[in-house]
Amino acid sequence: MAFNKMWCTVALGLLLPFSYAHTDFFTSIGHMTDLINTEKDLVVSLKDYIKAEESKLEQIKKWAEKLDRLTDTATKDPEGFLGHPVNAFKLMKRLNTEWSELESLVLKDMSDGFISNMTIQRQFFPNDEDQTGAAKALLRLQDTYNLDTDTLSRGNLPGVKHKSFLTAEDCFELGKIAYTEADYYHTELWMEQALKQLDEGEVSSADKVYILDYLSYAVYQQGDLHKAMTLTKRLLELDPEHQRANGNMKYFEYIIAKEKEANKSSTDSEDQSEKETVVKKKDYLPERRKYEMLCRGEGLKMTPQRQKRLFCRYYDGNRNPRYILGPVKQEDEWDKPRIVRFLDIISDEEIETVKELAKPRLSRATVHDPETGKLTTAHYRVSKSAWLSGYESPVVSRINTRIQDLTGLDVSTAEELQVANYGVGGQYEPHFDFGRKDEPDAFKELGTGNRIATWLFYMSDVSAGGATVFPEVGASVWPRKGTAVFWYNLFPSGEGDYSTRHAACPVLVGNKWVSNKWLHERGQEFRRPCTLSELE
């Protein structure tokens, strides 16, 4: 199967391009890299500021020492001291003039750059939405890849180049963000991790009282009343006068006493209610479980017998003149639906050109809202994308021609090349590329029919995570730079192939760049004729 600019720093600091002055930094690693340059520039300015401030403080220190001696003498005999007219004059002069000069010196920005630089750069900084988005991404990665909080906190992730760890304060912040989302499960996990690190002796500004306050409430919200009481007791040992904890303790004792008095019938009724809730959840969870298992490389459904029927080959695009003498490498990834991978199909130079064209245009990726029919952002699609036309670059034009030659499909009715860069924990949860029967107007504005097929370039390797998975059939396709995968979304009859439901798994470690071409029905009438059988 195997074939086998530097940034220019101006006097007042570094300015990001205007197009980057927006939110959603966390949805694209490509845009986040620019923040590294910004922070480096600020560090340089800060170091200059420190040197200047140290010099200023030396001047202030000498002034303070001189006045300390003077006032020490004056306060022992104020009237005698001021009886000397020179001393009286100098006191008037000091308070009227010299202290004002000292005030100006204290307030002066000696570096003549750092504060101005900060003011300018702040408009390009990530905001609360970015911080929350990055925090949610960590929680998403934790769930998808079954990572315990200690592993994530210690930074023990596969394929990492620059190991980093979370402090107790970082863990506390993650817990607070989960709390604001009413996500008490993750609130408990991260507050417990923060507490653990403090108990192990980590020096931190995080306060155990605050942590226990959040933790006990999160545990209570999940129904573990006895654990909530234990945590509240520990809080009260640290702060016996804590008003909310004392109130909670009385309430917990009241609830426990009430539960003991409850009769068995009410308990049975509650149990039945819980069972019904579990049943309702199970109706939703199977696809999610399959999706996450496939992201971890588990749950693949390819049997050895089916595996034997997959081949690799040299492919000439059905005798296409451009590839007869130089066929491309092709290998089967899956049989039903048939997914093929093309190897060495896009060069590093082409990839860099596509990325450079796309970077200034990257914006938050959108999805079709089935109710309104309009494009909107969604929490289940965390990435940024840009669209490139063939007429604006010979490289993009050449790529479009290559797709047409190798698929045999007309690209004149296809959508423009979409370039996507995934951010922290970037993902796109299970979805269809084609419009279903309950979405008759999905691509009406294009006038080219439904999306007949998908071509997907992988423009980077991913250290961990980031697979393209097909939950309906149990397939996982892993990113490999310079390759592309192709599949049909519609049967020849025009009916949608529901087995092509797929997802982009969260990127655990690394930076994921892809580009895709969605080919449409119009223009394919003689290239891929219809059949009479609906599912042929």
Image (cartoon, rainbow, N blue to C red):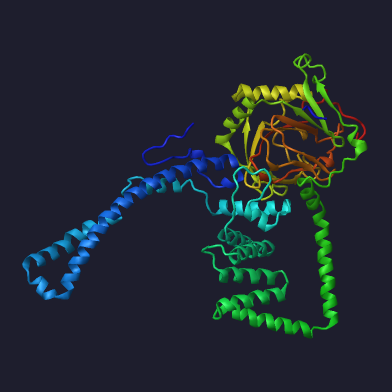
520 in relation to 187, above or below: above
Residue at horizontal 55%, vertical 77%? Answer: 239
304 in relation to 326, above or below: below
Residue at horizontal 61%, vertical 54%? Answer: 135
In depth, the one of 297 and 470 nearer the eye is 297
Q: Where does residue 369 sit, x and y in percent of width and height?
A: 70, 47
Q: Which corner quadrant of the image does residue 457 belong to?
A: top right
In depth, the one of 506 and 157 nearer the eye is 157
Q: Where does residue 290 sit, x and y in percent of width and height?
A: 81, 49
59 left or right of 131?
A: left
Q: In which quarter of the image is the C terminus?
A: top right
Q: Which corner quadrant of the image does residue 492 belong to?
A: top right
Residue at horizontal 63%, vertical 55%? Answer: 153
Residue at horizontal 60%, vertical 42%? Answer: 29
Note whether residue 116 is visible. Answer: no
Q: Quadrant of the N terminus?
A: top right
Q: Where does residue 126 sit, x and y in percent of width and height?
A: 52, 49
Q: Where does residue 338 sit, x and y in percent of width and height?
A: 84, 34
In depth, the one of 119 and 411 nearer the eye is 119
Note whether residue 96 is visible. Answer: yes
235 left or right of 262?
A: left
23 left or right of 351?
A: left
How many discs mark residues in the rendered view? 0
